[in-house]
Image (cartoon, rainbow, N blue to C red):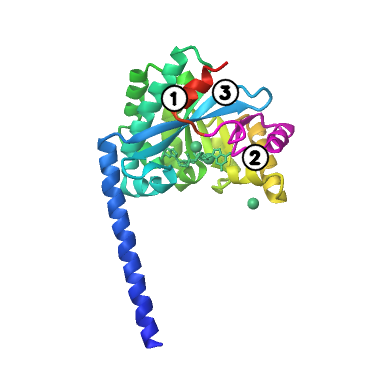
Amino acid sequence: AKDRGRNTYQFYTNDMTEKAYERITLETQLREAIVNREFEVYFQPQVNINDNKIIGMEALVRWNHPQTGLVPPGKFIPLAEDTGLIVEIDRQVMQDAMKQFQKWIDLGLDVGVLSINLSMIQLNHEDFIEFVKTTIKNAKISTDNLMFEVTETQVMKNPKQAIFMLQQLKDIGIRLAIDDFGTGHSSLSYIKRLPIDKLKIDQSFVMDALVDKDDRELTRAIISIANSLNLEVIAEGVETKEQAEFLVKNGCVEAQGYFYYKPLDVLTLTKELTKS
Ligand code: C2E
Ligand code: CA
Ligand code: CA
Ligand code: CA
């Protein structure tokens, strides 16, 4: 038993060392990626379920890793948040996304409103508002075409600070959405006080709405909260026609999901937009 104990211990330390090593490697590579601007913005169109017309697009970052290829955000955003590197990554995403979106507008394409994901770390950065203003000016984009998304969980970590920062974005004319709504335990009284325009129903509810009674009721409840607070509402993770029909029937007309479009690179999406 003593031997086994020692082996377990050894296995544990090796495992920890490897994890720590992986983290350091990833962090080093992330720093290089920032310098070399290896991040690429993909866009996922959002539609009106009734006519399938595009009403907006969400910018989603990908990392074009020189050795391993395209890395999804789930693989590097958590470490980027822990190390604060997310601030610089999100700045590059914001610059590139706004410039590209304005290009589509200049081509006369109906792209609607651009949604950009924010991290609270970035939002708390002292010169954030100045950076946003400068980026908008450089991209020559109108704030009428802009929406920022922040997750319910991040807002609820420090609601007072969040309200203060979000209000400054509202003041310069940017619309705001609460992302992953339904997963962050916010109270109705707080939602009412947030300077927001839109709720995004978390995809875990939408995906199971037709098979799980709880998810179905939660989806319905979020739509009715949005309607009664006069907020727009969009469903994420719509993968089937049946899910879309369920949403419309319950009062949600906006959707985003693989049933309509996957996140696409600029070249593919430009072809798609100019097809008709
Ligand atoms: P999110 O903001 O909730 O974005 C939606 C995610 O759901 C995206 O994953 C999208 O590709 C995926 N998705 C959309 N429709 C469907 C569907 O029908 N089925 C399924 N299975 N998935 C769908 P992605 O691109 O991997 O991004 C993951 C998360 O990473 C995002 O979740 C967001 O929290 C974060 N993220 C992405 N880009 C950025 C960024 O530029 N900055 C920051 N701070 N976070 C970002
Ligand atoms: Ca989002
Ligand atoms: Ca989401
Ligand atoms: Ca479920």
Any mark on residue 55, and which?
Answer: 3
**x and y, in percent, of residue 274 in the image:** 52, 17
Within 8 Å of ligand 1, the CB of disc 1? Answer: no
In the image: residue 111, left or right of residue 246: left
Are there few (<14), some (14-19), or many (20+) residues within 10 Å of tag 2? many
Ranked by sequence position, the earlier of labels 3 and 1 is 3
Q: Distance between the residues labelled 2 and 1?
A: 35 Å
Is 244 included in the stretch rendered in magenta? yes
Mark nearer the N terminus (2 vs 1): 2
Instruction: State the separation of the CA atoms marked 3 and 2.
Output: 21 Å
Q: In this view, does 213 lie to the left or right of 237?
A: right
Q: Which of 40 and 256 is in front in this view?
A: 40
Disc 3, disc 1: CB below 8 Å? no
Could you classify mark 1 by the number of other residues whose Cα lies within 10 Å: few (under 14), some (14-19), or many (20 or more)? few
Q: Looking at the image, is mark 3 or mark 1 nearer the viewer?
A: 1
Task: Give how far apart the Cα atoms at labels 3 and 1 are.
Answer: 19 Å
Q: What type is the residue that disc 2 sits on?
A: Ile
